Amino acid sequence: MPLVAAAIAPHGFPIIPVLSDDAEGALETRKQMQLMGSTFKEVGVEAVIISGPHGIRVDGSFAVVDAARVAGTLRWNGNFAEVNAPCDRPLIDALVRVATEDGLPVSRVSYAGNRVDQAVAPLDWGVMTPMWFLGHDQNESGSGDVLALAPEPNGAPGVVLVTPSRSLPLAAMVEFGRAIGRVLGDDARNVGFIASCDWAHTHREDGPYGFHESAARVDRAVVDALRRNEPGVLVELDQHDIETAAIDGLWQTLMLAGIQEIVPLTIDVLSYEAPAYYGMIVATAMPDGR
């Protein structure tokens, strides 16, 4: 069947409950991420493709993690969160095959064992944060080490991790999204997609990227496009604004726009917050008629 749930999810990792009691001011974002996780669980998502900006990157290519599992640890103010999760091998192979047939540049990336069934890849915060809210929150001490033994299955969905290269044209993101839409439509299971995105990173002078007046303008434009159920219009964002606002969600959201061309989706913006120097949007995108 086609995908049963999709979402745009932030990755400001203090929203993970074990890392910060107050989510560094983003309690509404945390609440809506928990709602997103509940939605994915209610529709029975068994495997999910997550596209984020911070994973292993290959210039000029879509990097797809080709491993048996992924593992990682996040530390914040003396607290830690650990995730060790299986990759979904059938979905990886199908995505690489279809995208390659479409003429898109795809690179399989991995780490450690040379046999795929023994390979593992390190997690970044861009995928680990949404994964936490999808049920990968067992937080067993030591499990985040990429060389740790795999934990017992806990019923959370297997993952496929994709990192796009920003040297590719924005139109390629939409094309890759169309490929994802066809792959998910051909899978017999309940499958999902998450665009892991934070938005403008120049909201505050004391942030690592400084302040720029484009930050608020760009975030408003993104929220407006999503509320109009038109993520594809973001391909027209001004390049200067993209750079000065220092957004990292555009590429993954354009993949969602491509999926939407294959599987009609209705986007519901659940929250927007910018309590620190970066903006965070939580939005679900559910198939029409569900």
Image (cartoon, grey):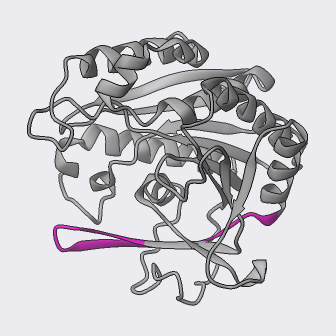
Q: Locate the N terminus and report the quarter of the image it occupies.
A: top right
Judge left or right: residue 177 versus residue 8: right
Q: Could you tell me which residue is drawn at 33 percent across and 54 percent down?
A: 13
The answer to whether residue 119 of the structure is visible from this angle is: yes
Is 85 within the magenta? yes
Image position of 192 with respect to 76: above or below:
above
160, 32: nearer the viewer: 160
Q: Locate the C terminus and report the quarter of the image it occupies.
A: top right
Q: Main secondary structure of the magenta part?
A: strand
Q: Magenta part of the protein: which range?
A: 73-89
Q: Could you tell me which residue is drawn at 85 percent across and 45 percent down?
A: 100
Is 238 within the magenta? no
Q: Could you tell me which residue is drawn at 48 percent across and 52 percent down?
A: 130
Judge left or right: residue 182 versus residue 111: right
- The quarter of the picture where residue 238 lies is top left
Image position of 96 with respect to 205: above or below:
below
Residue 222 % position (x, y): 43, 19
Judge left or right: residue 20 versus residue 56: left
The answer to whether residue 189 of the structure is visible from this angle is: no
Q: Could you tell me which residue is drawn at 45 percent across and 24 percent down?
A: 269
Residue 155 % position (x, y): 65, 68
Residue 21 % position (x, y): 19, 58
171, 84: nearer the viewer: 171
Image position of 222 with respect to 94: above or below:
above
- The quarter of the picture where residue 176 lies is top right
98, 140: nearer the viewer: 98
Residue 41 % position (x, y): 61, 51
